[in-house]
Structure formats: structure tokens, C-alpha cells
Image (cartoon, grey):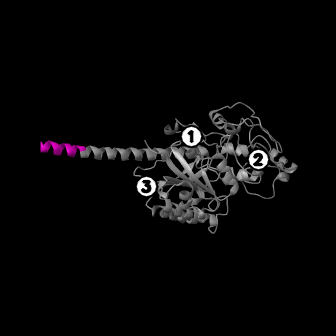
Amino acid sequence: MMKRLKVIDLFCGVGGLSYGFQANKSFEIVAANEILPSMATAYAINHPSVNVYTGDIKNFDSNWLESDLGEKADDIDIIVGGPPCQAYSTVGKRSSNDPRGKLFREYHRILTEFRPKLFLYENVKGLLSMQGGKLFKDIVSLFESLGYSVQYKLLNAADYGAPQIRERVIIVGSRLTSRFQYPIPTHYDPSKPLDLFKRHLKPYLTLGEAIGDLPLIKSGEESFKYATEPKNEFQKLMRMNAPKKIMDHNAANHGAKLIKIMESLPEGGSPADLPKNLRPTSGFKNTYCRLWWNRPSTTLTRNLGTPSSSRCIHPKTPRPLTTREGARIQCFPDDYKFYGSRSDKNLQIGNAVPTVLSVSLANMILVNFEKEYENSNRQVLQEKEKRNYVKNSLLEHAV
């Protein structure tokens, strides 16, 4: 029987990337590291069995694990992590001087020290184009220099059941003999032609399907009761262990003019759809924009509660998304807890990996290790049979 696979979670945030590993009994997350105290607290609340180290990644090393947990570096099977992505984001300034853009070197340092059998490195799509693609090639080469077979693929969380278009680069490095296979999509974009190979897939989950059972509160309001019974499998999953009162479903107060702007926006609308006297005098094309009810959300950001940020205004009521609605879009179940102020909680959610993507990746990593275990046992058995055959042949010859 294969032992539980031991995992370290770097840049752990609130736990989106490691959610699929925590939810699967075949894995054991032994340690996590996060520099932001509110993030680390939220992670610890939701992962009580994990030893969480709060502080700069530069200070994280195997000595901590050995002294605190008795775990040696070579006990670790898997390392996962997604360094802060702001330096690479196509929405941000994409500065090559941003120190957050150098954190892959700390990830490399830890890989060098622990030498896990497999690692998973997650980041934004913009990483592929930074410095004309040179930075990405350098990162892959750095990982390959440690003896890892490195693969990468751009995955869209909507393809795996998230109610959100969210593309992320997933790099997997392995020292296993069997090749890692990326998860096969379970959903498809219904706005595109459906070919023969996608007929078994489900259409993308829409925003309405994801949050339709949450009450339609207005600016300055809050509600603790669900509006309806669960209407679909996603809502049932999100509410499986839900508390009696909905957490974090409250809307900030906004001024009369901003509310008027949000009221005047059509579904999916932007400032270009407003009367000239209501159009904001600042912002970008994707700010002060309304979402669609019957489509997946656009990529959620840390400012999901700020109308002047990337598209985040509710399709049916004049306010931005609540923290709980943001959590649903990122596929965190309703019993998942966030910590700190509203902006702290929204940061924890906006920076996370949708949990359904984490579950799909964890499942495929487990399949990869199971194949390795089977191959290893098969080789041991073949060697044993070979030795027995030689031994029996020698005995027959002696007789």
C-alpha cells in the first residue's frame, strides 16, 4: 500500500492551491509558508493540522521542519506554490524590477534543499510573455538544472467547473519515471461550436448558477439567510457543511452618485453605455463594469468589492460583489473562513486558485504517483521472479 504523500505549501495564501491536497486523504500537508499575517491566520483556521510558518520565504528551510516536526528534507514528496503574481500580471504594471518577480529563485532554493519527487508551480498567464518570454524560459531552465523533467500548460479554471474565466500557467516538474498527465477538462465554452470530442462535457458554470441562492442585498445591507434551497450540484457542494448563518455576505456603503452609475449600467455594461453626465472621469475600459448573470465571471481580483476596479459589479443589484460571492466564484465552500477586514478577506480570495482546479491537479498528481508505485512494485516482483528462476535452475542442474 502506498504511503501518504507529504506536501509543503509555499506562498500558501488562504489555501486555494493546496485545497485539493488537503481534501484527499492520500496527501498530508505537513507545512506551509505565508508572509502576510492575516493570510497565514486564515490558512491556519482552515488547515488546523498544518504547521504554518508566518514570515519571509527567505527564512524558510528544512531546519524548521526537522526541529519542529521531525521531518527531514528527503521525507517531502511534493512541493506546491504560486509566488505573488503582481509583477507578471497583464493587469498590473509588469515591472521587471518588482522584487516579487524574483521569488522564483526562492522556490528554486527550496527545491534544491528538499529535492521533492514532484513540484507544482502556479502563476498568471502574463509570466509567459514577460521580457519577451525570456524570463519564463529562464525559470524552466533553472528547474531543469535540478534534474526535473519540466512540463507546463495554460489551464482555464472554467474548463474544470469554476464559474470564472481564469487562466493560469501550471508548471509541473517531476523526477518520477512515469510522465505527469494534466487533467482533462470537464466543461466547455457554450459560445463556441461544440465538436464531437466535447459532447460529453458540461457547459461552463455561470455566475447565476454559482451565486443564485444567495440573497440579492443592496449597498450597505447584509443577510445571513439563503434566498432559496440549493438549485444545482455546485450550490449543493458549496453548502454541504455550511453554517446556519451565511458568513461575509455584506455590502459596503456607496455614495448616491456611484449607486446611480451602477443602477444605470446594463447587464455586462461598461461606462460607454452610460449617459455622458454619469460616466466616470477616470478608470480603464474594464472598470465600473457590470458582470453577466448567464456567463462565467471574468477573472476575479483582490478588489472584487471596488466598483472602480476590474469588472465586479453584480448583474442584478447596484453594488459590487460581496466577499462570500467572491468566495463562491473561487469555489470556496460556504464553511470556509477568511480573516481580517473586508479588504483583507477580499485579498485572500482574489489571490487564490479556484479550488476545483486544485482538486483536478491533485487527483492527477496522485494518479502519477500510483503509476510510479505500481511500476516499482512490478519491477521488484520481476526481479524476485528472475532470482527464483535462476535459483531453481541451479538446483535442477545440481540434481
* Residue closer to the observer: 251 or 248: 248
Residue 201 visible at all: yes
Q: Residues within 10 Å of mark 3 (few under 14, many from 20)?
A: some
Q: Position of residue 394 (x, y in %)?
A: 16, 46
* Residue closer to the observer: 266 or 302: 302
Residue 291 visible at all: no
Q: Position of residue 204 (x, y in %)?
A: 61, 40
Q: Position of residue 230 (x, y in %)?
A: 68, 32
Numbered circle sitting on residue 320:
2
Residue furthest to the right in view is 256
Q: Main secondary structure of the magenta part?
A: helix
* Image quadrant assignment for residue 65: bottom right
* Image quadrant assignment for residue 336: top right
Please indicate whether residue 261 sits to the left or right of residue 211 in the image. Answer: right
Tag 3 residue: 175
- Which amino acid type is shown beneath numbered disc 3? Arg
- Dot 2 or dot 3: first in sequence order is 3
Q: In which quadrant will I find the N terminus?
A: top left
Tag 1 residue: 187
Real-space Cα distance between discs 2 and 3?
45 Å
Please state the extent of the stretch shown in magenta in the rendering: 388-399
